[in-house]
Image (cartoon, helix red, strand yellow):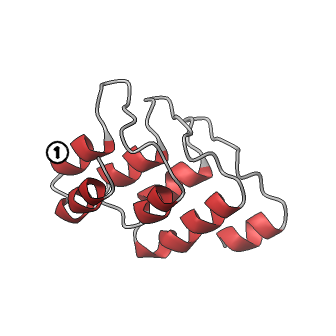
Amino acid sequence: IAKLLIENGADVLASCVAGESPLDRAARGGHDKIVTVKLLVERGANIEYRDVNERTPLISGSIHGSKSIENLLDAGVDINAFDKDGGTALHWAGHNGHETVVKQLLASGA
């Protein structure tokens, strides 16, 4: 569905009333969102977008243990960005017990 919407002019830079971007929402998802994240990044979505909690898509994905963060890391996202509470992607992945994401972040330089 995301591909269809984007191909028909959906704004990849839009945000909802809660301050979340399409990339932020996709980054939280599981395997089915990996392609969506890649497509959004390829179409110019802001990989450093900040929501109302100052969380980037990488932080949001790490909070939820999402494998889709790989595409964000490949795109050159700031791996050490922090949210309004000072939490980084590595902090949140560890806090929530997402060992695979912790390993991926450490291997990428966090």
For the point 54% across and 41% down, the residue is 48
Residue 18 picture location, percent across and down: 55, 35
For the point 21% across and 61% down, the residue is 103
For the point 36% across and 62% down, the residue is 66
Vertical position of residue 14 compared to residue 83: above or below: below
Vertical position of residue 79 compared to residue 19: above or below: below
At mark 1, the secondary structure is helix
Residue 80 picture location, percent across and down: 36, 39
Q: How many marks?
A: 1
Q: Is residue 106 left or right of residue 16?
A: left
Residue 13 picture location, percent across and down: 70, 45
Judging depth in this view, the residue of 106 and 10 nearest the camera is 106
Q: Is residue 100 left or right of residue 37?
A: left
Tell me the kind of residue under disc 1. Answer: His
For the point 47% across and 41% down, the residue is 56
Q: Is residue 78 left or right of residue 46?
A: left
Q: Residues within 10 Å of mark 1 (few under 14, many from 20)?
A: some
Vertical position of residue 89 compared to residue 87: above or below: below
Residue 85 picture location, percent across and down: 31, 25
Q: Is residue 53 left or right of residue 45?
A: left
Quarter of the image where the N terminus is located: bottom right
Judging depth in this view, the residue of 26 and 75 nearest the camera is 75
The residue at which mark 1 appears reads as: 95
Res 108 → quadrant: bottom left
